[in-house]
Image (cartoon, rainbow, N blue to C red):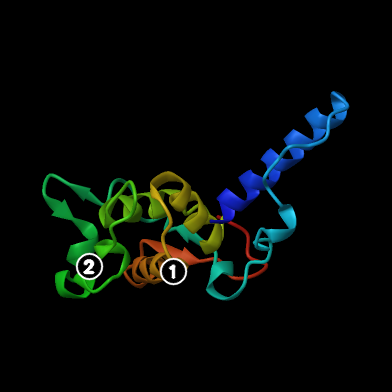
Amino acid sequence: MRLSVQYLRLVYETELSFAEYLNLPPKSKIDPSKLPDVSEVTGDGKLVFQRSPQLKGPMSVFGYDYFTDKYGEERGRRLKLLNFQGLRGSGEEYAYEVLNFVDGVRNAQQIRDAVSAEYGPVPLEFVVEYLQALEIIGVIQQVRRGERRK
């Protein structure tokens, strides 16, 4: 949603600039005052994670799944993200991209927004729950405030 709102604001600003340039009244049906405020990131959306430097390579290869091996199949089945069906992707695709976006800079909200732009909206809580599961098995680690990415 955040990216959609930002996109709509940019469309509105672009239409205004063209209208001003051509001395025409703006015809946009977008009312920026009615768009939700998405600028503030709060709660778990502020969490930042980085990949563990000790782990290299893919999470699954030749039938082996590192996540399932370390986290457990039954526990993994309870993760909401892995069971999620989005507009353009399933839980496994969302999970793959969530980990791809972990870079020690992006927060959980930004990761959720990027994955939502790619596959369709997904609740932040699903993404955070999956990130915390990855942290439990040592794939990623939380970057504390003031720490630098290694």
Is residue 71 toward the left or the right of residue 131 in the image?
A: left
Asked if residue 105 can be seen in this view, the reply is: no
Quadrant of residue 82 within the rendered picture: bottom left
Residue beneath label 1, please?
128
Choose mark 2 or mark 1, whichever is in front.
1
Question: Within 10 Å of the Cα at label 1, are there few (<14), some (14-19), or many (20+) other Cα atoms?
Answer: many
Where residue 59 sits: x, y (%)? 26, 52
Residue occupying the point 59% across, 70% down = 144
Along the viewing direction, whichever of 24 and 12 lies nearer the viewer: 24
Where residue 119 sits: x, y (%)? 38, 48
Quadrant of residue 140 within the rendered picture: bottom left
Residue beneath label 2, please?
70
Q: Which of disc 1 and disc 2 is earlier in sequence?
A: 2
Residue occupying the point 33% across, 56% down = 95
Residue occupying the point 12% across, 44% down = 62
The type of residue carrying mark 1 is Val
Quadrant of residue 47 within the rendered picture: bottom right
